[in-house]
Image: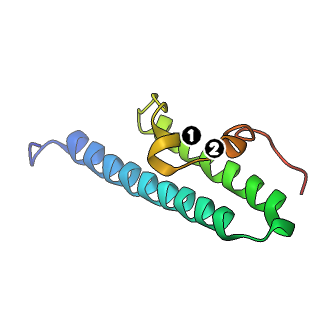
Amino acid sequence: MAADDPIEAIEYELQEGRAYALGRAGKRVEDAIAALATGTPHARELLLSQAAEAVWEFIITRESAGFYDHALLEDAYGIPPQVMARVGVVRKR
């Protein structure tokens, strides 16, 4: 990065922000999947919806950072098929 190029400096800052957002979104997926795995059967529907929402947000964040191939996410994060089936489904609040 050239020290005197303001456009490169701005792009660097944007990339840092994207990386931070991507890390946070990934952590939310991990936390939601862990909560689903340890949750009670009574809370399962809510936990499935929350996990699907976290995965959906993660996918959107990845795409905003330029990552469009999500094929390995299920394995990498241990996302159950029941969660993937709900990704993009908006539940009533």
Residue 19 picture location, percent across and down: 36, 51
The residue under label 2 is which amino acid type?
Trp
Observer-nearest residue: 91 or 71? Answer: 71
How far across and how far down the image is residue 60, in percent? 56, 40
Q: How many labels does the image show?
A: 2
Colouring: rainbow
Asked if the residue under mark 2 is in contact with the one under mark 1, i.e. CB atoms within 8 Å, the reply is yes
54 vs 31: above or below:
above
Q: Could you tell me which quadrant the C terminus lies in?
A: bottom right
Secondary structure state at the residue bearing disc 1? helix
Q: Which mark is residue 32?
A: none
Q: Nearer the viewer, residue 80 or 27?
A: 80
Going by the numbered disc 1, the residue's amino acid type is Ile
Which residue is found at the position 63% from the left and 43% from the top?
56
Q: Residues within 10 Å of mark 2 (few under 14, many from 20)?
A: many
Q: Residue 56 carries which label?
A: 2
Taking the image as shown, residue 40 lies to the left or right of residue 67, namely: right
Rendered residue at 72%/70% (across/down): 39
Q: Is residue 53 left or right of residue 59?
A: right
For the residues labelled 1 and 2, the Cα–Cα distance comes to 6 Å
Q: Quadrant of the N terminus?
A: top left
Q: Position of residue 40 (x, y in %)?
A: 78, 71
Using a 10 Å C-alpha cutoff, classify the residue at mark 1 as few (fewer than 14 neighbours), some (14 to 19) or many (20 or more): some
**Which mark, residue 60?**
1
| Disc 1 versus disc 2: nearer the observer | 2
Residue at the image point whose x is 42% and y is 57% from the top: 23
Percent of width and height locating residue 37: 64, 63
Relative to 84, does residue 48 appear above or below in the rendering?
Answer: below
